[in-house]
Amino acid sequence: MLFAGIVIAILIFLMTGTRGLFTPTLMLRAYFENAAGLRVGAPVRLEGVDIGNVSKIAVAASRPLSPVEVTMKVANKYPLHKDSIAILSTAGVLGETFVDISNKGAKGPAAQNWDALKTEGQPAIQDVIRASNGTLQNVDILVRRLDRIVSAIERGEGSIGKAIYDPELYNRLNTTLTQVQSLVGQISEGRGSVGKLINSDELYDKLNDSINKINKLVDQVDQGSGTVGKLLKDPSLYNNANEAISKANKLMTDVNAGKGALGKFAADPEFARKLDDIIANLKTISDRLAAGEGSAGMLLKDPSLYTNADQMLVETRNLIKAVRENPKKYLTIHFKMF
């Protein structure tokens, strides 16, 4: 019975342990701010693989910032470094807490017995719950608002409530659908402008005829027929335009050289001086006329001339009227004989 008990104990140790019976072990330490539910015997894992167990948890008074000292017994066959990082992790949301060692970025020498590994904080479930309290409160407020909105809709309040519970809206919508159905039926029968546009071939025939006429017109233009065709195809237009441009260039050359009337007008300074004198004289005459000087100025400015002329016209009109009324008085000829 004693032998059987020893065998069973060895089998249980081999089945539940993470190390072999004769596997060399390594004692390591890590310091944390809080144990966060870690227990003695909790697994120690390297990148998620079990490599040992927690052998001791104590409080180190000499380290006020990270007072929890965790002693770990791990197998010495795994690649651990002095700068490996130990993290307190949780298996799921409500699982047990264990020590997870990470070698990411670790490039230091191999870990020795009783080395203290670096640690990093991992948010505990309590911290997560405290951080989520505000979110849960906001969700609760949102749920209450949604409940009020749904209640208002069920009572038929608001646009959505009326759209769901108001029979008048249903009747209007039904009437609208009936009218749309009637309109679609008329279009399908070819009635109305839209119906003719969809069902009648007349518009297609007219459009096709217009396209044929446009194609014919384009062909005529391409063949050089008509004014536009000659404008595009006849080289004489280009030659005439080129000749006209050449003559214009020659004329401009002659003008710049001072030839002809335009050339003298553009290049002769004496002609320009004479023209300037004429303009100055005309300005002087215009100023004198405006001032009422001379006969022409008095003719423009003196109102007595207009008055006398108007009076003469009136007297002439009266004389002609009197002659027409009594011509004998003015047209009688008297002869005297000695």
Image (cartoon, rainbow, N blue to C red):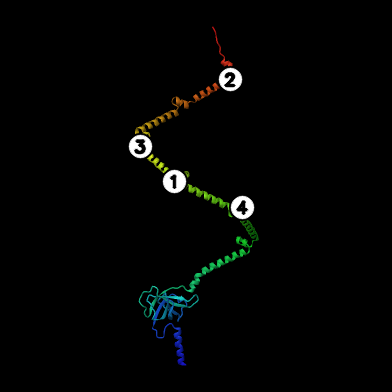
Dot 1 lies on which element?
helix
Inspect the image, locate mark 1, and give the three-letter code of the amino acid beneath it: Lys
Q: Which amino acid does label 2 sit on?
A: Arg
Foreground of the two, 135 or 81 = 81
The residue to which callout 4 is attached is: 192
Tag 2 residue: 324
Residue 48, picture quadrant: bottom left
Q: In which quarter of the image is residue 115?
A: bottom left
**Disc 4 and disc 3: Cα gap in Å?**
72 Å
- Give the quarter of the image for residue 283: top left
Residue at the location (54% across, 50% down)?
209
**Few, some or many C-alpha atoms within 10 Å of disc 1 (few <14, some 14-19, many ≥20)?**
some
Which element is circle 4 on? helix
Reply above or below: 241 against 311.
below
Task: Name the spot of residue 301 as percent of width and height, x first.
Answer: 47, 27
Q: Mark 1 points at which residue?
A: 233
Residue type, label 4? Gly
* Mark 3 / mark 1, whichever is N-terminal: 1
Tell me how far mark 3 sits from mark 2, CA to CA. 69 Å
Farthest residue to the bottom: give it.
Answer: 1
Q: Secondary structure beneath disc 2? A: helix
Q: Determine the residue positioned at 60% across, 65% down.
A: 150
x, y (%) of residue 124? 47, 74
Q: Which of marks 3 and 1 is in front?
A: 1
For label 3, the residue is 254
Query: Can residue 264 be seen from the camera position used here?
Result: no
